[in-house]
Amino acid sequence: MKFNPFHQKIGIIGGGQLGKMLIESGLPWNVAYNVLDPDAHAPARRYADTFIHGPLVSKEHILGLAEISDILTYEIEHIDVETLIELKALGKRIIPDPEVLRIIQNKKFQKEFYASNNLETTQFRIVQSMNDVASAIETLSGEKFVIKSAQGGYDGKGVWIVPKSEILNGKLDLPPMEYVVEEFVENATEIAVIVARSQDGEIEAYPCVEMEFDPKLNLVDHLFAPANISSALEDSLKDLATRAVQKLDGVGVFAVELFVDQSGAIFINEIAPRPHNSGHQTIEGNTTSQYEQLNRILLNLPLGKTDLLGPVVMMNLLGQEGVEGDYTLTGLEELFKTPKANLHWYNKTSTRPGRKMGHLTVRADSVEIALQHARKIRRALQMKPFTR
Ligand code: ADP
């Protein structure tokens, strides 16, 4: 068969909902995918030409995936980066570059990268144990600080927001390891900008989205676009996010999370080198989704436009309190009677409180109306325990 760009096999390390939606966006082009995941019921499994069941940090399994794939990508950061670096040296195409992943995997490396490249970020210090936190905060300002384990954190795990008094009283008791201690941004507006950069260096930033967090779970409850900010601020945030990806020399799709403080100052919080929860709504809400954009980049095709089609809300559907294991989904009527409302259900076979089970995207004439619809749909949807 004559070669065309769609005849390259993409290997994805990680087969969760991000992998699932990446594959869904490539299906109209008949792109084939292989998937590696430790969960035999991984959401992306049913779409995979070959599913490799194994750990994401296993050299043997990553080599196995590389052998049957033309290009490798990943949908999660906690993977064996050293094997990817070895594969790259042998000529394997890996997007984003594993050297970029190596920086991002470690919050200390990330912070140092931002600081040394004049990318605005909160003031921080690195400490090797809890004993050093009190002296570190003497050179920082504020009444609250954020302590983050340098390695291994995700979805707010490994992040502690702590009042100064608690640190000075020696009340804090965290396991010995390396931490980033940073200034807390009071009443921050949390913004995400998805930035796509092609193999040729073409770059596109998506419009800013504003995120509202669930304070108990430390996860995004919902987000909306356009963000409730001035166009000058929107431009500054997109510019900072774009500069960060350029400085990383990153190729791929990057989710840049930023804070805006009460005075309008902006800071980069962190970057994910992959499609992200904060870009789910680009499937229905933008000209080109973050997933299609990554497929274009992997296949070395031109980038698509990122314009917002209109006001949009994305709401996470998290596992409910009191329901664990097998479940059944009820209360779909509200969803199906609402125009421009879309459900993405990740096909996870069991639920637990706070687990990301699916999401809703709702478009309307205004963010307020879209949010009202989304809230109503989510209230109606219930995961009920299922017994056979
Ligand atoms: P993770 O990588 O686990 O998502 P983050 O660094 O994004 O961790 O922190 C999780 C959340 O904690 C952020 O989304 C934000 O709500 C809050 N947070 C983190 N750092 C700060 C900060 N310096 N100031 C204010 N809030 C912060």
Image (spheres, helix red, strand yellow):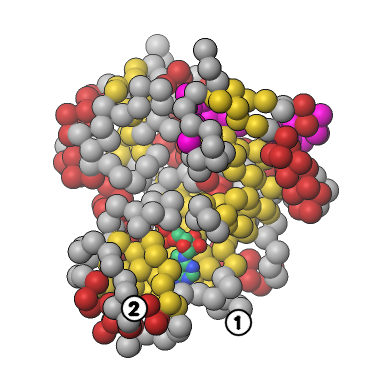
Q: Residue at x 20, y 70 (%)?
A: 128
Between label 2 and label 1, give the one nearer the viewer: 2
Q: Is residue 36 visible to us here?
A: yes
Label 2 and label 1: CA atoms lie apart by 27 Å
Q: Indicate the amino acid at tag 2.
A: Ile
Q: Residue at x 18, y 45 (%)?
A: 82
Taking 152 as reference, is 95 above or below it?
A: above
Q: Is residue 134 left or right of residue 48?
A: left
Picture quadrant of ligand 1:
bottom left
Of the residues under marks 2 and 1, which one precedes in the sequence?
Answer: 2
Along the line of sight, the residue nearer the viewer: 310 or 135: 135
Dot 1 surroundings within 10 Å: few (below 14), some, or many (20 or more)? few
Q: Indicate the amino acid at tag 1.
A: Ser
Q: Is residue 117 left or right of residue 212?
A: left
Q: Position of residue 289 (x, y in %)?
A: 58, 40
Q: Is residue 4 left or right of residue 283?
A: left
Which residue is labeled 1 in the image? 263
Whether residue 9 appears in magenta in the rendering, the answer is: no
Which residue is labeled 2 in the image? 167
Where does the magenta region start and end?
A: 335-352
Q: Position of residue 362 (x, y in %)?
A: 72, 41
Quarter the N terminus occupies: top left
- Secondary structure, mark 2, is helix
